[in-house]
Image (cartoon, helix red, strand yellow):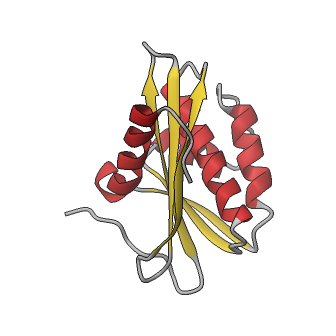
């Protein structure tokens, strides 16, 4: 069984996920920040218009998750996503030439603002809380932190 795993001591885990509706031309980015005990230290979702692909929505979710973690003052962050492509683009040592390259670049810039920052893939089952937040954003159609 796959489930959420806590970060090491003195680190936080930022789980991110995106909701996407091509019909509504609407996406949401959800994020949850938890410590090694599993306590939720922050969470929220943002609603976006005119994002045209799920891939871009996932990259934007990563960006917003890191921005929120930075705003909260965390120094050691593991960003976890169930998007293999997003994690691949963020960890690939060469240039990102995908449609998300501008967002990927911004995520990498934000990552340098932390003392430690890692990017990891998790299966959807390990990201269920964040997935639920992204879905809630699609229902509410407003930002919530």
Which quadrant of the figure has residue 60?
top right
Give the residue at x 73% y 59%: 111
Q: Is residue 42 above or below residue 104?
A: below
- Name the outermost residue toward the bottom: 9
Give the residue at x 50% y 77%: 35
> Residue 41 at what x, y percent from top left?
53, 72
> Residue 108 at what x, y percent from top left?
74, 51
Give the residue at x 39% y 41%: 136
Image label count:
0
> Residue 102 at what x, y percent from top left?
75, 33
- Name the outermost residue toward the left: 1
Q: Specify the quadrant that holds the C terminus.
A: bottom right
Q: Is residue 110 left or right of residue 128?
A: right
Which quadrant of the figure has residue 69?
bottom right
Q: Specify the quadrant that holds the N terminus.
A: bottom left
Q: Is residue 102 above or below residue 63?
A: above
Give the residue at x 60% y 39%: 59
- Name the outermost residue toward the top: 23
Q: Is residue 122 above or below residue 77?
A: above
> Is 62 or 25 nearer to us in this picture?
25
> Residue 144 at what x, y percent from top left?
54, 48
> Is 123 or 49 nearer to us in this picture?
49
> Is 34 or 59 nearer to us in this picture?
34
């Amino acid at each position: 069984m796959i489930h959420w795993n806590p970060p090491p001591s003195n680190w936080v885990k930022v789980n991110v996920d995106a909701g996407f509706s091509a019909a509504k031309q609407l996406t949401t980015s959800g994020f949850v920040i938890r410590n090694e005990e599993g306590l939720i230290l922050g969470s929220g979702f943002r609603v976006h218009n005119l994002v045209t692909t799920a891939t871009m929505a996932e990259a934007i979710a990563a960006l917003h998750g890191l921005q929120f973690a930075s705003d909260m003052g965390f120094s050691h962050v593991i960003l976890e996503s169930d998007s293999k492509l997003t994690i691949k683009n963020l960890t690939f040592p060469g240039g990102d030439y995908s449609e998300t390259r501008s967002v990927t670049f911004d995520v990498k810039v934000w990552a340098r603002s932390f003392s430690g920052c890692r990017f990891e893939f998790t299966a959807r089952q390990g990201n269920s809380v964040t997935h639920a937040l992204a879905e809630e954003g699609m229902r509410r159609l407003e930002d919530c932190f």
